[in-house]
């Protein structure tokens, strides 16, 4: 398993940052060859299920996820969420925390990935690629970018 940790300081309050990092379709706009379908009705919260599809045409894989913890920031507090990854190819979890700091906030994204049939020998590579991909995705979400790059 590869554990990836990304931290970003943002000059916006946590209450403004939270909707950006929990906009699941916007995540897909940051990652090439990926689309996201939210399976459950709004509003988002515990029990929300969505599927990230990565691939080109019929060649690709689904990464289904479910929100199992949902605590938006309230009155200057910290927001936290946890996703469980339940796919046939990718398993693991992701936790995102948005906490106030000064006049802005800090976002901490921690993700554990287990890729089916990929030996642990490749964990350092998965970690490096994950930091790059998830870091760019987080940067795009925080900047408010909603289109593919």
Image (tube, rainbow, N blue to C red):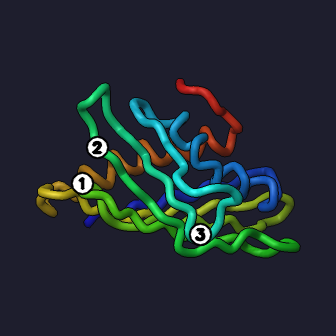
Q: In front here: 19 or 3?
A: 19
Instruction: Using the numbered discs, state the Cα–Cα distance from disc 3 to disc 2 in whole angstroms.
Output: 24 Å
SS for tag 1?
A: loop
Disc 3 packing (10 Å; few <14; some 14–19; many ≥20): many
SS for tag 3?
A: strand
Disc 3 vs disc 2: which is toward the camera?
2
Please indicate, yes or no, whether residue 3 appears anywhere in the rendered image. no
Instruction: Using the numbered discs, state the Cα–Cα distance from disc 1 to disc 2 in whole angstroms.
Output: 7 Å
Image side of residue 68 versus residue 70, left or right: left
Residue ID for mark 3: 81
Disc 1 packing (10 Å; few <14; some 14–19; many ≥20): some
Residue ID for mark 2: 61
User: Where does residue 103 sit, x and y in percent of width and height?
Assistant: 86, 60
The residue that appears at 24% across and 57% down in the rendered structure is: 88
Check if mark 1's residue and mark 2's residue have beta carbons within 8 Å: yes
The residue that appears at 38% across and 41% down in the rendered structure is: 53
First in sequence: mark 3 vs mark 2: 2
Check if mark 3's residue and mark 1's residue have beta carbons within 8 Å: no
User: Where does residue 35 sit, x and y in percent of width and height?
Assistant: 46, 37
Q: In front here: 117 or 11?
A: 117
Residue ID for mark 1: 89
First in sequence: mark 1 vs mark 2: 2
Image side of residue 68 versus residue 9, left or right: left
């Amino acid at each position: 398993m590869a554990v990836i940790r990304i931290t970003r300081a943002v000059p916006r309050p946590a209450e403004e940052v939270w909707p950006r990092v929990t906009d699941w379709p916007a995540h897909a706009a940051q990652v090439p060859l990926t689309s996201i379908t939210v399976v459950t009705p709004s509003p988002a919260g515990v029990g929300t299920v969505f599927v990230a599809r990565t691939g080109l045409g019929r060649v690709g894989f689904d990464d289904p996820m479910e929100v199992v913890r949902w605590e938006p920031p309230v009155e200057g507090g910290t927001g936290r969420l946890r996703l469980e990854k339940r796919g046939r190819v990718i398993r693991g979890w992701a936790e995102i925390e948005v906490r106030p700091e000064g006049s802005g906030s800090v976002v901490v994204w921690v993700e554990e990935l287990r890729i089916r049939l990929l030996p642990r020998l490749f964990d350092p590579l998965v970690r490096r690629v994950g930091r790059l991909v998830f870091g760019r995705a987080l940067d795009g979400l925080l900047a408010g970018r909603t289109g593919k790059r």
